[in-house]
Amino acid sequence: MTTSVSIGRVEALHVEIRRVPASRPLEWLRRGWDDVKRIGWPGLAHGALIAVLGGVLLALGSTHMYLTAAAVTGYLLVGPLMTTGLCELARRREAREPLGFDESLQALPRNPDGLLHFGAILGLIALLWFVLSAVLLESMLSSSVPSLAVALWGGADVLTAGQMLGYVLCGGVLAAIVFSVSVVSVPLIIARHARASEAVRASLRVTAANSPAMVVWAGLIVAVTAFGFVTLLAGMVIVAPLLGYATWHAYRDLIA
């Protein structure tokens, strides 16, 4: 008898994509809201931490419009990774497992490599955005990146409406990329031990197979997140768990 042994190779994760109607994201938000009410303080604690982080970034970037825009955009680009504990809470509620803040952190050691690599992907996109921002300001938009003195103490440099529009449009393109690679990535990583590359490919397939629903879902995310910012991040205490839980329900509907 001959035995074949494969060393250092991991079997690829098989992911079956479902198609959903365009209106389905509304149901994800409804279920997410139900989770917000039922899970309670552990999710709100995550929301408070996310809001505090956003407040710190905005405070650091408040001295210049460029820094403010960069802080907000960077905050949103790495946002999917911040939902890890919230997705774990939604998973636990569905599985009728104990719910608590400590329990929500158990998602981190379950697949640390997958989360670390996915975080590196989002970090790379955020870094690309910061570099692109500098290029836009110094060339296409005929402005300049703020000096260290301006960054620390503020200054009179401001961006015109046209410059800000171009800046936001470029940021929107990168945000769309992040959305496409992260639709189901975090739930796949923590629930099925997917590698980051597998989770990203699955998210891209989900986006391609459910374009109408993804457009609606992206619009809802923008609208709900805008509410969090309009309330000076106080609303993010509710918005973050709402979107985190809804992300889990999106995963459950979109992945067989």
Image (cartoon, grey):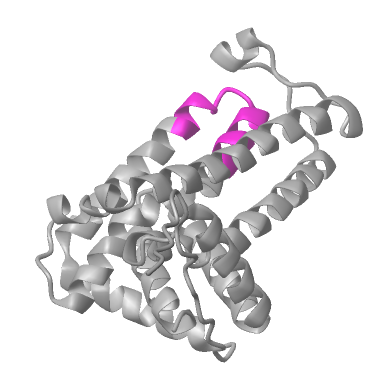
Q: Horizontal placement of 78 versus 92: left or right?
A: right
Residue 18 lies, with reference to residue 226, above or below; the image says: below
Query: Does residue 235 appear in the picture of this structure?
Result: no
Res 207 quadrant in image:
bottom right
Q: Horizontal placement of 195 versus 21: left or right?
A: left
Q: Position of residue 74 (x, y in %)?
A: 56, 40
Total number of numbered discs in the rendering? 0
> What residue is shown at x 55% (from left), y 39% (from top)?
123
Q: In the orientation shown, which residue stands out farthest toward the top?
A: 149
Instruction: Indicate yes or no whether the magenta region holds residue 66.
Output: yes
> What residue is shown at x 29% (from left), y 55% (from top)?
85
Query: Does residue 110 appear in the picture of this structure?
Result: yes
Res 30 quadrant in image:
bottom left
Residue 188 lies, with reference to residue 30, above or below; the image says: above
Residue 160 lies, with reference to residue 5, above or below; the image says: above
Instruction: Indicate yes or no whether the magenta region holds residue 192.
Output: no
Q: Nearer the viewer, residue 107 or 176?
A: 107
Quadrant assignment for the N terminus? bottom left
- Magenta segment boundaries in residue numbering: 57-74
Q: Position of residue 193 (x, y in %)?
A: 36, 60
Q: Nearer the viewer, residue 124 or 48?
A: 124
Q: In the orientation shown, which residue stands out farthest toward the bottom?
A: 21
Q: In the orientation shown, which residue stands out farthest toward the left?
A: 98
Q: Position of residue 92 (x, y in %)?
A: 20, 69
Q: Position of residue 211 (x, y in %)?
A: 67, 79
> What residue is shown at x 43% (from left), y 50% (from top)?
7
Quadrant assignment for the C terminus? bottom left
Q: Horizontal placement of 20 versus 96: left or right?
A: right
